[in-house]
Amino acid sequence: MRPLEDVRILAVEQYGAGPFGSMHLADLGAEVIKIEDPSTGGDVARYVPPFQEGEDSLFFEAFNRNKRSIALDIANPAGRSLFEDLVRHSDVVYSNLRGDVPPKLRLMYDDLKELNPAIVCCSLTGYGMSGPRSAEPGYDYVLQGLTGWMDLTGEPDGPPTKSGLSLVDYSGGLVAAISVLAAVHAARRDGIGTDCDVSLFDTAVAMLSYPAIWQLNGDFQPARTHHSAHPSIVPFQAFPTRDGWIVVACPKEKFWRRLTGVMGHPELADDERFATFAARRANAATLVPLLESIFQSQTVAHWLNELRLAGIPSGPVNSVAQALADPHTLARDMIMETTHTRFGTVRQVASPVRVGNGAGDFRRAPARNEDASHVLRDILGYDDERIRSLTRQQAFGAYDE
């Protein structure tokens, strides 16, 4: 058995952040049932281009493998009744909605505890469920600007720049998944569930980490750095070579001494301007151009071979295609495959979460409402007449006699 095979999660989720977190729980064996609104065509991620046809998109596949789907209108009285039956048979109600929406949809612990005292209600929102921005929609790009990330990213003389990936969304999803695991553990220990108020904003602020503590407790002013350099350690940045870019890091004095030898300038190791962390930082304006000129004298392959032999932390600046084809990516089984009814074999990146041998079958993302029969018959035990009655009451969306 996979670690979470005894956990059932009702996911009122859409787009990226929430589905990213619940997908990792699904990969670990949790039964994640997507509750998709029939009036809107379900999760909006189904319609994100490119590589999109009908209700299928590779974007949706990237966030929803190993899950199940049922189309259910939880604002409809009959749909709400069905949803409450599911709550009785589940461990978690998981949502990523605007901060004022979970209370309106009655997805909070106080709304559901009479149905299941041990239910965990995790709400991943843009700004949290309190504070002046709680009712605002939160999106990764906006939050990267708001929380200082863009001010820190890019060249010193360039514009503020967002990360090339939706890191606030992804990190928020993982924080939500951690919160769910902790809350389920406590609920099974104590018999009492709880709310988890998780936000993308809090996640992004928390990830300011050491620049934040330096700023809060001293005169440090976080700023963008030349060629993505570390804010305090020199050298620790990207360098141009004759035919590409490499990243070289000297977070220990031994690496700096080795680097001077690799570069053919061992005298720099004992130069008083560069002999210590503090000295190299103080004299970075002199040292970095010198290193750049040396690195530009040879190719990426030359430097990576020399740096690797010397045990100096380093690597190429790969394209996405190069990163996915890297021998280490393949050796770590980070590329997986599923079979899709429209797209055929779909290759995608695997979860980095490893528990035990990490083995397990992977299913493509579900079609909308694909698992209605499993949910209604296998989990809830509904018979044909009950299902017909719910259909007539439009629990599953508009019904035409």
Image (tube, rainbow, N blue to C red):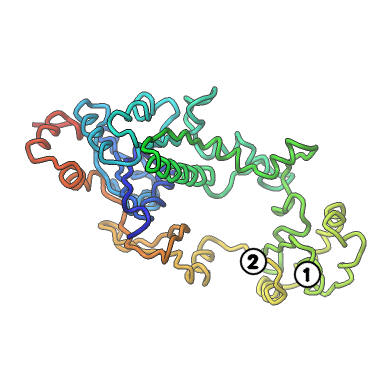
- Residue 110 relative to residue 168: left or right: left
- Residue at (39%, 39%) from the top-left corner? 190
Q: Is residue 78 visible?
A: yes
* Mark 2, residue position: 315
Within 10 Å of the Cα at label 1, are there few (<14), some (14-19), or many (20+) other Cα atoms? many
Spatial separation of the CA atoms under disc 2 and disc 1: 14 Å
Q: Position of residue 56 (x, y in %)?
A: 31, 49
- Residue 43 relative to residue 213: left or right: left
163 and 74: which is toward the camera: 74
Judged from the image, the secondary structure of the residue bearing numbered disc 1 is: helix
Rendering quarter of residue 396: top left
Within 10 Å of the Cα at label 2, are there few (<14), some (14-19), or many (20+) other Cα atoms? some
Rendering quarter of residue 399: top left
* Mark 1, residue position: 259
Judged from the image, the secondary structure of the residue bearing numbered disc 2 is: strand
376 and 49: which is toward the camera: 376
Q: Amino acid at mark 2?
A: Gly
Q: Amino acid at mark 1?
A: Leu
Q: Please tell me whether residue 320 is drawn above or below residue 46 in the rendered image.
A: below
Q: Please tell me whether residue 73 is drawn above or below residue 328 in the rendered image.
A: above
